[in-house]
């Protein structure tokens, strides 16, 4: 597909006069265009849901979630990946972000890196991609060779393949198991896909990782109960989460958190059930780490 055929590369007729406007009116133009992004993502919810369910099924069997993209798209995948360990207590290698051109490309533009399809394949080989994994290819245009090469390889070895693009995707036909295509229209500044297209990609990635972590038991109600209390801010967050979940006395919360080495899940289960550390751990194991399920089991049967 030629660049002039891409929706994201069209000229936006709503902003042709943006260089003549005062600052407030410029911002109104940008804001009006941004309002279209959430609606475009909303239309893709059925496809996003399919992708999440497939991803979770594989992660429950030990598979990884891997984002891969070039430029802004690659950086957005990395941002989402690096936030998962501190937020949800997963190991750093469970959600991975890869970018064309390697780590240097996170900060600097690496010209031509996105045009190398073989590099996309090689980057997946370098992390020992296997059939349990899920690969999410992120590209505003839908035609980035680096991403397509990666997805083709992932498909060949039996990994789940998901595409995210802001243009219709003939290049992805037969490669991806699920296609997510939020059509956000032309950018405020022609071709600046870090804007609406980038925002749409970020919203989709938020949905993929957040819902996957919820379904993996990393959330109780809307609380991040697998948070790792590795600094003062996160220690305070752990205290607050336990307080909200249990409404227990502050001194008791602190006592139980210290007993569990600031394991928020276990502390909540202990405070709600009255079990000790060993009993609470066994109950959580029985519930496969799901706090709500552990409480339901406790309330439905006698615990010795």
Image (cartoon, rainbow, N blue to C red):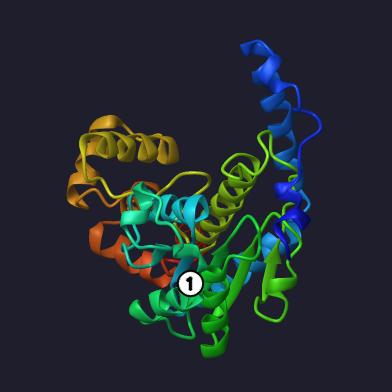
Which residue is drawn at the image coordinates 65% and 35% (left, top)? 189
Q: Is residue 277 left or right of residue 118?
A: left
The front one of 225 and 67 is 67
Image position, residue 236 (x, y; %): 28, 34
Q: Is residue 8 left or right of residue 199?
A: right
Q: Residues within 10 Å of mark 1 (few under 14, many from 20)?
A: some
Element class at badge 1: loop
**Residue 265, relative to residue 18: is it above or below?**
below
The front one of 195 and 36 is 195
Most extreme residue toward the right is 13
**Residue 54, relative to residue 49: is it above or below?**
below
Q: Is residue 133 left or right of residue 139?
A: left
Placement of the N terminus among the 4 image quadrants:
bottom right
Placement of the C terminus among the 4 image quadrants:
bottom left
Which residue is drawn at the image coordinates 46% and 80% (left, top)? 61
Which residue is drawn at the image coordinates 76% and 40% (left, top)? 11
* Residue 91 sits in quarter: bottom left
Image position, residue 103 (x, y; %): 32, 58
**Residue 177, relative to residue 26: is it above or below?**
below
Res 303 visible: no
Label 1, on which residue?
A: 116
* Residue 152 sits in quarter: bottom right
Res 100 visible: yes
Image position, residue 71 (x, y; %): 48, 53
Which residue is drawn at the image coordinates 43% and 66% (left, top)? 302
Most extreme residue toward the bottom is 157
The front one of 177 and 56 is 177
Image position, residue 263 (x, y; %): 28, 52
């Amino acid at each position: 597909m030629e660049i002039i055929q891409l929706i994201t590369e069209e000229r936006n007729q709503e902003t042709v006069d943006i260089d003549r406007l005062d600052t407030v009116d410029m911002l109104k133009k940008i804001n009006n265009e941004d309002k279209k992004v959430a609606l475009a993502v909303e239309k893709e919810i059925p496809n996003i849901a399919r992708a999440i369910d497939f991803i979770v099924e594989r992660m429950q069997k030990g598979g990884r979630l891997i984002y891969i993209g070039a430029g802004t798209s690659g950086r957005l995948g990395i941002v989402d990946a690096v936030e998962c360990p501190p937020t949800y207590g997963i190991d750093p290698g469970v959600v991975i972000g890869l970018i064309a051109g390697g780590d240097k490309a996170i900060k600097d533009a690496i010209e031509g890196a996105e045009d190398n399809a073989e590099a996309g394949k090689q980057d997946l080989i370098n992390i020992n991609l296997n059939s349990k994994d899920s690969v999410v290819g992120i590209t505003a245009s839908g035609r980035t060779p680096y991403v397509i090469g990666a997805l083709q390889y992932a498909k060949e070895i039996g990994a789940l393949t998901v595409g995210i693009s802001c243009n219709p995707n003939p290049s992805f036909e037969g490669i991806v198991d699920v296609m997510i295509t939020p059509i956000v229209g032309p950018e405020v500044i022609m071709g600046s896909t870090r804007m609406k297209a980038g925002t749409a990609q970020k919203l989709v990635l938020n949905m993929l990782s957040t819902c996957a972590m919820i379904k993996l038991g990393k959330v109780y109600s809307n609380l991040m109960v697998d948070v790792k209390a590795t600094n003062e801010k996160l220690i305070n967050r752990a205290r607050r989460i336990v307080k909200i979940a249990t409404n227990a006395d502050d001194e008791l919360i602190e006592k139980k958190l210290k007993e569990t080495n600031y394991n928020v899940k276990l502390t909540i289960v202990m405070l709600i059930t009255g079990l000790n550390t060993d009993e609470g751990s066994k109950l959580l194991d029985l519930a496969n780490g799901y706090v709500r399920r552990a409480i339901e089991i406790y309330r439905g049967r006698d615990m010795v």
